[in-house]
Amino acid sequence: MISVLLLAVLLIGGGVLYRQLAPGVNTNPVDGTGDSVSVPRHREESSALSTELPAAETEEPRSTEEPITDSPAELSDDLSADFGVLDEDGNPVHLSDYFGKPIVVNFWATWCPPCRAELPYFDAAAEAYDGQIQFLMINLTDGYNDTVESATAFVREENQYSFPLFFDTEFSGVEAYQVNAIPVTLFINADGSLLHQQIGAMDEATLDEYIRQLLA
């Protein structure tokens, strides 16, 4: 009886000690079956990024107080948080460059099942509202799970999507909007104010409803 009690004490004590020594153990891994999946909080360095990063690093960040826009629309005093990404040609661009027109921003990755499920809706909407709304489909390009090359191939070759493609190689947008799980979609009014931030995948009807609100 005493030996049984000692064994139980040792097992319980070992479990407590393990949890104290290994706080980083993931006891709830993401399986991708929900409406969103967690964004890894570390980024692997990759030589695939080396040809894309210098232009973005040497570019002076633009202030949201002086947005670049061809539209005469008056901007809101409460502008959405700005961030910088790369366009498909490798040029650095900023969210504020597009203020003056309604904007739909979508953060996604190829390894995210909910993201992949809603991409056809965004592709159809980008075509239907071309010229009325600026779509920024932003890949979380960590250089390990997704690279500029692999994300481009996924969009243009494997699925033949035509939506505007951008790459968040520095996780600038992720940090600006504290994106912890994807997909995340931002609906930004023409005056630069944030209409809605959607966490998790949407169906086509929900996407269309927020687009109608942007155009109202």
Image (cartoon, grey):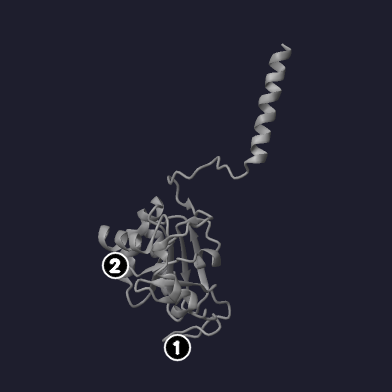
* 11 left or right of 97 in image: right
Q: Residue at x 53, y 41 (%)?
A: 28
Task: Tell me the quarter of the image containing the C terminus.
Answer: bottom left
Label 2 secondary element: loop
Q: Is residue 66 above or below residue 151?
A: below
The crowding category of the residue bearing disc 2, from other C-alpha atoms within 10 Å (few below 14, some 14 to 19, many at least 20), is: few
The three-letter code of the residue at mark 2 reads Ser
* 61 left or right of 12 in image: left
Q: Is residue 142 above or below residue 6?
A: below
Q: Is residue 69 above or below residue 127?
A: below
Tag on residue 162?
2
* 59 left or right of 207 in image: right
Q: Residue at x 65, y 40 (%)?
A: 21
Label 1 secondary element: loop
Q: Residue at x 49, y 66 (%)?
A: 170
Q: Nearer the viewer, residue 66 or 34?
A: 66
Q: Circle 1 sits on which residue?
A: 72
